[in-house]
Amino acid sequence: MKETPWFYEHCLGADFEVTDSDAANFLQSQFSNELRPFEAGRATYGLWLDAKGKVMGDSVVLCLGASLFRVCSEGSDGATIRAHLERHIIADDVEIEPINGAHGFEIPAEVCALIDLTVPDAGHFLETEYGCLAHAPESCCRFLVDSDSAATKLRARLVELGCSRLSTTEHGLLRMAAGRPLIPEEIGPADLPGEGELEPVAVSFTKGCYLGQEVVARMHNLGQAQRRLFVVEGTGALPVLPMPLHDANGKRVGEIRSAYSEAGGWQGVALLKRRFVLSGNKLMAGVKAIKVRDSLSERRAKSV
């Protein structure tokens, strides 16, 4: 992780409320992770899957009360998730309403102390003067800030303390270093959670039935997925995404899903067939050689 204090401000891809008498049980039947007990202050990260277990998107679900939940995501599209959920409302008393204008901030946990805030326990959030503050993976915290004035106040405070504001590229490289997949760009509607090795942080195997649960459980019980996310690097301009990758024999072994510029070239994340790829391998993107560095899961293990 970056050693100097930093913050990352971003727009929210998804932000909406789920309410009414059946909201809790409905979300429990659709979400990949355990939402119980339905107690105010809980913050749960997980996935929205289709019937085939493919990843439609990811979210953090904030429990604001027994029948009031807020669903937000940095990268997943809110309209897509809402439409996905609405298709599965049959006789449930559930209302889904979008929220507009919220700001998302990500900061290292140690920066919380600099602004006199307590880091929430894992799986929980706290109400602060700036907005909701939730614990996140890789020793980070995330703010959900509802007003422009609160966002301005938080931004000014962080800058005053010497925190640098990360660009999208800087944050992408930092995220890759921590081994965190970007959804849905790196693992999405054509992929299973196991291919992004998301089960430890985003999937419950004890909560009972939810959409896509049978497929996810079957893959988990059969062993490792055939594909895996790897960090790759190349020289020159950023590749056009998604970029197919082939081995020395011309066999397609996967594709680059994301890429960020850095000195002398770029780094990115590729979904590759595990049996054809080892760290250090050279692959081809057209006529250009691409080097495989290591897997995202290996980086995640080192960052813990």
Image (tube, helix red, strand yellow):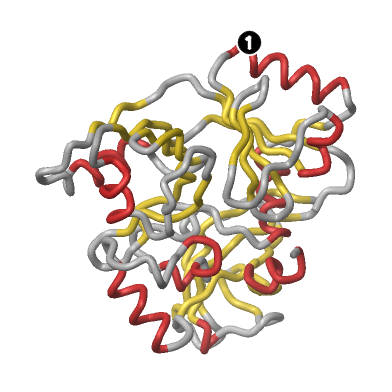
Rendering coords of residue 208 (x, y %):
32, 68
| Residue 270 higher or lower than 158, as above or below | below
Q: Quick one: quadrant of the C terminus?
A: bottom right
The residue lying at 22 percent from left, 36 percent from top is: 94
From the viewer's perspective, tell me whether residue 56 is left or right of residue 141. Answer: left
The residue lying at 37 percent from left, 33 percent from top is: 68
Residues packed near mark 1 inside 10 Å, few (<14), some (14 to 19) or many (20 plus): few
Question: Most extreme residue toward the left, as rendered?
Answer: 91
When asked about the image quadrant of residue 115, the answer is top right
From the viewer's perspective, tell me whether residue 73 is left or right of residue 214. Answer: right
Q: Nearer the viewer, residue 223 or 165?
A: 223
**Looking at numbered disc 1 in the image, what kind of residue is underneath it?**
Ser
| Residue 293 higher or lower than 181, as above or below | below
Q: How many marks?
A: 1
| Residue 65 higher or lower than 288, as above or below | above
Give the structural element (helix, strand or loop) at label 1. helix
The residue lying at 45 percent from left, 39 percent from top is: 63
When asked about the image quadrant of residue 221, the answer is bottom left
Rendering coords of residue 100 (x, y %):
42, 21
Q: Nearer the viewer, residue 212 or 57?
A: 212
The reply to whether residue 289 is in sight is no
**Which residue is identified by label 1?**
149
Q: Nearer the viewer, residue 11 or 249?
A: 11
Q: Nearer the viewer, residue 41 or 143?
A: 41
